[in-house]
């Protein structure tokens, strides 16, 4: 019997696949981009997108656990595109699990499912899921999480994890975007907002612990997953930049002004045939200026989760890796 990882070629998914292989477990991956290196290690690759419901359902056959890490991620785009991947794709996973008798489903959600436009300081799982957000990603992930947890039963045990800002060596999103925009970044708001992150090794640990905890109290519940060490966002960014020989971010912009710029950008991207994501949106402005850190005693209690890689350790490792990469001609 195999374990299925959707999105197994992504940052989190690939690290999860590698850990499963190291434990001697048969692994299958459902994704859009072939991974010959994983196939060479014995991974069975099934090429399909999440909006191909028959293929997604069929991929669940013969599995004992499904780790559903795949999603359409972003701060901007058509709601229908996010809905088709994040909601309909998750419904296809649920249907496949039921049809083929898969007993365990670990769903990768996001803390932004509790977005409310306000500071989130020490927030816990009692917060309601968002129904009003200027970005389609949290809205569609909230719908999918609700349906995953509602599907929990004796035959299919489900759990949702909310890892916040996954980072580490190999991260293709968070840190590369910071570095690409280093000279153009501005501190939004006071620059004192604290945020939580989670190093990728810790995020993988949490997924495997959640799988095991489905036999107990975790079934039917959601958990925030972080390093448990909130950092002042802009201090951490500048520490990273200095470590790489880049100038720190010193220029500032108020949250109100950034939100206004974001609204203008959103309007332009709706009207004009512009590609990619706007450089600023109302959602980005809020995320860069407000507190968003989370209490994780529930994950510690029910999953036995304890972050192994500290922020200091992970940051030092990342800086050393990026410095070495810069030195290669």
Image (cartoon, grey):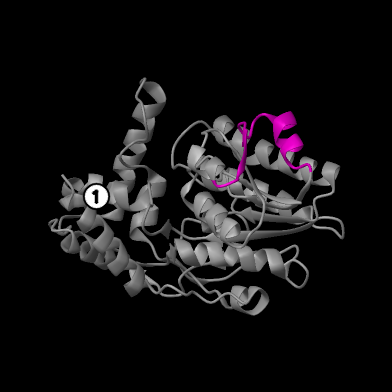
Q: Nearer the viewer, residue 14 or 40?
A: 40
Which secondary structure, mark 1?
A: helix
Coordinates of residue 179 in the picture (x, y in percent)? 24, 50
Coordinates of residue 321 in the picture (x, y in percent)? 27, 59
Q: Residue at x 72, y 38 (%)?
A: 59
Image quadrant occupied by the C terminus = top left
Q: Is residue 293 left or right of residue 157?
A: left
Coordinates of residue 7 in the picture (x, y in percent)? 56, 44
Answer yes or no: is residue 218 visible: no
Answer yes or no: is residue 105 visible: yes
- Crowding around mark 1 (Cα neighbors within 10 Å: few <14, some 14 to 19, many 20+) is some
Coordinates of residue 281 in the picture (x, y in percent)? 37, 42
On screen, 264 above or below 64? Answer: above
Q: Residue at x 62, y 56 (%)?
A: 129
Q: How many marks?
A: 1
**Location of residue 16 by image quarter:** bottom right
Q: Residue at x 62, y 75 (%)?
A: 298
On screen, 196 above or below 262? Answer: below
User: Magenta stretch: residue 39 in it?
Assistant: no
Q: Residue furthest right?
A: 154
On screen, 78 above or below 243? Answer: above
Q: Is residue 275 left or right of residue 71?
A: left
Highlighted range, magenta? 41-61
Q: Nearer the viewer, residue 59 or 258?
A: 59
Q: Which residue is mark 1?
A: 179
């Amino acid at each position: 019997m195999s374990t299925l990882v959707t999105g197994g070629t992504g940052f989190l998914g690939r690290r999860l696949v590698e850990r499963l292989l190291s434990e001697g477990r048969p692994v299958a991956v459902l994704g859009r981009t072939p991974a010959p290196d994983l196939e060479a290690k014995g991974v069975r690759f099934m090429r399909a997108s999440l909006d191909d419901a028959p293929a997604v359902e069929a991929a669940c056959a013969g599995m004992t656990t499904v780790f559903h890490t795949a999603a359409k991620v972003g701060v901007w785009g058509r709601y229908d595109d996010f809905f088709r991947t994040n909601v309909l794709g998750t419904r296809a996973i649920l249907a496949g699990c039921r049809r083929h008798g898969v007993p365990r489903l670990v769903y990768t959600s996001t803390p932004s499912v509790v977005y409310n436009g306000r500071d989130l300081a020490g927030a816990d799982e009692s917060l309601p899921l968002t129904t009003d957000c200027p970005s389609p990603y949290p809205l569609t992930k909230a719908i999918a999480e609700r349906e995953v947890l509602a599907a929990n039963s004796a035959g299919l045990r489900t759990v949702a994890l909310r890892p916040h800002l996954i980072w580490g060596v190999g991260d293709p999103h968070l840190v590369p975007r910071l570095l690409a925009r280093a000279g153009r970044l501005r501190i939004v708001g006071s620059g004192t907002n604290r945020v939580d992150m989670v190093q990728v090794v810790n995020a993988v640990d949490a997924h495997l612990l959640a799988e095991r905890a489905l036999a107990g109290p975790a079934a039917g519940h959601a958990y925030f997953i972080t390093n448990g060490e909130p950092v002042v966002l802009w201090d951490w960014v500048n520490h990273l930049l200095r470590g790489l020989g880049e100038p720190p971010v010193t220029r500032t912009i108020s949250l109100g002004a950034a939100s206004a710029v974001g609204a203008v950008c959103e309007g332009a991207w709706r009207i004009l045939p512009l590609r990619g994501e706007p450089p600023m949106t109302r959602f980005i402005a809020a995320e860069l200026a407000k507190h968003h850190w989370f209490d994780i005693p529930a994950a510690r209690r029910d999953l036995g989760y304890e972050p192994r890689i500290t922020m200091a350790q992970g940051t030092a490792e990342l800086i050393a890796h990026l410095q070495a990469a810069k030195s290669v001609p």
